[in-house]
Image (tube, rainbow, N blue to C red):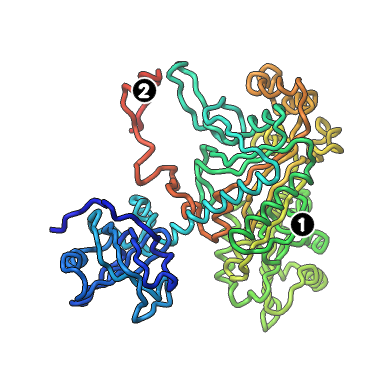
Amino acid sequence: MLQTEFLGNLRRSHYCGTLTTRQVDQTVTVCGWVQRQRDLGALIFIDVRDRSGIVQLAFDDATDRTVFDKAFQTRSEYVVAAKGVVRRRSSVNHDIPTGEVEIFVTEYKVLSVAETPPFEIVENSDVKEELRLKHRYLDLRRPDLQNNIIMRHKIAKITRDYFDENGFLEIETPMLIRSTPEGARDFLVPSRIHPGQFYALPQSPQLYKQLSMVAGFDRYMQIARCFRDEDLRADRQPEFTQIDLEMSFVDMDDVLAIGEGYMKRVFKEALGVDVQLPLPRLTYAEAMSRYGSDKPDTRYGMELFDLSDAVADSEFVVFKGALENGGSVGGFTAKNAVNTYTRKTIDKLTEQAKGIGAKGLAWIRMTDEGVVSSFGKFMTEDQMTAILKTAGAEQGDVVFIVADGKKSLVLSVLGALRQEVAKKLDIIPDGFNLLWITEFPFFDWDEEAGQFVAMHHPFTSPMDECIEYLETDKAKVRAKAYDLVLNGIELASGSIRITNPELQNRIFAMLGFSPEEAHEKFGFLTDAFRYGAPPHGGMGIGLDRLVMQMLQCDTLREVVAFPKVQNASELMTECPAFVDKEQLDVLAIQTVKPE
C-alpha cells in the first residue's frame, strides 16, 4: 500500500500552470492534485493541477525505480509534490498553456491519498448541482469555478485601488447592530448578556456610513457583508457582499460620476472591455414606458408602444373596458417571429401572461397569407391599420398586446413578456449595456393597504421641486434616487440623503412613525444631524452580481465560494440546524420544533 510522506525539504518553486518553454532545462518543484494518471507500461504520465492550471509529469526507464513505483500507484485527486527538469514535450498539447513542456521527475512524494470522489473534477460539470454543493470543497477544485473565485478577488482588488485613488477611506462598520426597518426582514442575533434583547445583522451599512459623513470622513467605502432574510432567486443570497460608498458635499451627478469611473476601470482591468462614458440615463418613467421595467435590458430593441389612441374608438370589449377604467392598451413587436410564435406557442405565452397578472394576451401574426389576429373581427380596417402603423409591423412579425384598467400592470406584464420573447427568439447579443435609472417615484401605491408607501429607505431625499407635494399629491413626488442597471440586472442602488431635520420628521410622519417611534428607531442618526450634517449621498454596488454579470454566469452560486440554495440552507454543513437546549437556556430562548 502506498505510504504518504511529509513535504520535508521539497518546496514549491513554480505553480503548475506557469511553466513554459522559458523554463526548459531548469529544475523545478510543483505541488498539486492529480488530474489523471496514464500508465503506458514503461512510460507513465501524470497530469498535476493547482489553481493556476495543469502540467504533465513524465516517468520512464531512466526514472529512479522507487519514484516510478510511486507514480504507478498514484490515482486521481492524490495530493503530490514533484521535482524534476523541465523539457519539451514530444507531442504538443495546444489546449493548455503548458502544452509544450513536461517535467521529467527525479523526486516525487505522495502527500495525501484520496478516495474516488463522488463526481469527476472537470470544467463545466453536468453533475447535479445538489451533489456538487454537498461536496463544495471538491466542486471548488474545478478550474472554471476556481477562475471565478480568482476573478472575484481581482475585482475586489481593483475596487479598493480605484476608491483609494479617488480619496475614499475604507471604514469597517459593525456586524451586530440595532434592528431598524429597511424593507427586508432582519436576521436576529440573541444577546446572552442582555436576555430577551437582540442584535440584527446589517441589511446594509446605511446608517453607519451616514454617521461617517457626520463624523467628517467625507468619502467612505467598504466591501461590506450584508444580510437579508428574504426569499432567494438566481441573483440573490441571504448573505451578500456590497461595495458600499458615501460622499459628502455632493449632488447626484457627483455620485454617478464616481460610479461610472469605477465601472470603466473595473471592466477595463478585469476583462479588457472599454466602457463608453458617460453612461446613458433614463428616468423611471421613460424606462417603464419604453421597456416595462425599471431595470431594462437594452442590448436589444423591441421597445413597448402605447396603442390607447389607436384603439380609442374600438368596440372590442377588452380594449374598451381597459380605457374606460382609466387604464391603457400597449404592446411590442417581435420582428421575424411568425415562424417561432405559432398559435400553440402563443397559447403558452398567454398562460405566462395570466400568471403574472394579465387577463389575457391579444396578438397579430403577419403571415405570408396575410394578417391573422386574435381580435381582428372586432376591429375596422382603419383601426387595424392604425395598430399596425403604431407597431411598425411588417410581414413575418408578431405583435403582442396587453390591455388593463391599470397602466402600471400593462407595462410590467409587457416588460416581462418582452424578456421572455427575446430569449425564445435568441436575439439577445453578447456585450455589457450599463445605464442609470433616475427620478424614481418617492412613494409606491400599495393595493392591499389602499395607500401610498415609501419606495425607498426613509433617508432618501425627495427632489427639491417635489417637496411641496409631499402631503397633497404623493403620486407627483420623485426621489433623488438612482439605480445602475447592467443587462437587465439591478447592479447598484443609491440616493441623496435627507439632512434637514424638519424634512426628515415630515417623512417619518408620512411613513406612519410617531415622533416617539421615530426617535426610538432612528434617534441616534437624527440626533447626530443636530450637530451639523453635510449634504451627502452614496450607493451600494452588488459585488456578487457584478462578478456574476461580468463572467456571464447564470447564478450567484457560481461566484460565491460557499453559497446557500433556494431554501436558504447550505448543503455542505447542513445549516441551519437545531442547537442544544443548554445553548438556548443561556440565551433565555425557548423554541418549538416543527412537527
Residue 528 sits in quarter? top right
| 481 versus 360 height, above or below | above
The 10 Å Cα crowd at callout 2, few under 14, some 14 to 19, many 20 or more, is some
Element type where label 2 sits in the image:
helix
Which numbered disc covers residue 584? 2
Residue 471 sits in quarter? top right
> x, y (%) of residue 409?
68, 51
At 54% from the left and 60% from the top, the residue drawn is: 551
The 10 Å Cα crowd at callout 1, few under 14, some 14 to 19, many 20 or more, is few
Amino acid, disc 2:
Leu
> x, y (%) of residue 389?
80, 71
Residue sticking out furthest to the left: 1
> x, y (%) of residue 442?
75, 38
At 40% from the left and 18% from the top, the residue drawn is: 588
Q: Which residue is label 1 attached to?
A: 278
Q: Quadrant of the N terminus?
A: bottom left
Q: Is residue 337 visible?
A: yes
Among numbered discs 2 and 1, the one appearing first in the sequence: 1
Residue sticking out furthest to the bottom: 368
At 70% from the left and 35% from the top, the residue drawn is: 454
Give the left or right position of residue 589, taking residue 543 as reference.
left
Element type where label 1 sits in the image:
loop
Q: Are marks 2 and 1 in contact (CB under 8 Å)?
A: no
> x, y (%) of residue 149?
47, 54
Q: Quadrant of the C terminus?
A: top left
In whole angstroms, how far apart are the C-alphas of marks 2 and 1?
55 Å
Amino acid, disc 1:
Pro
> Foreground: 367 or 254?
254
| 434 versus 302 height, above or below | above
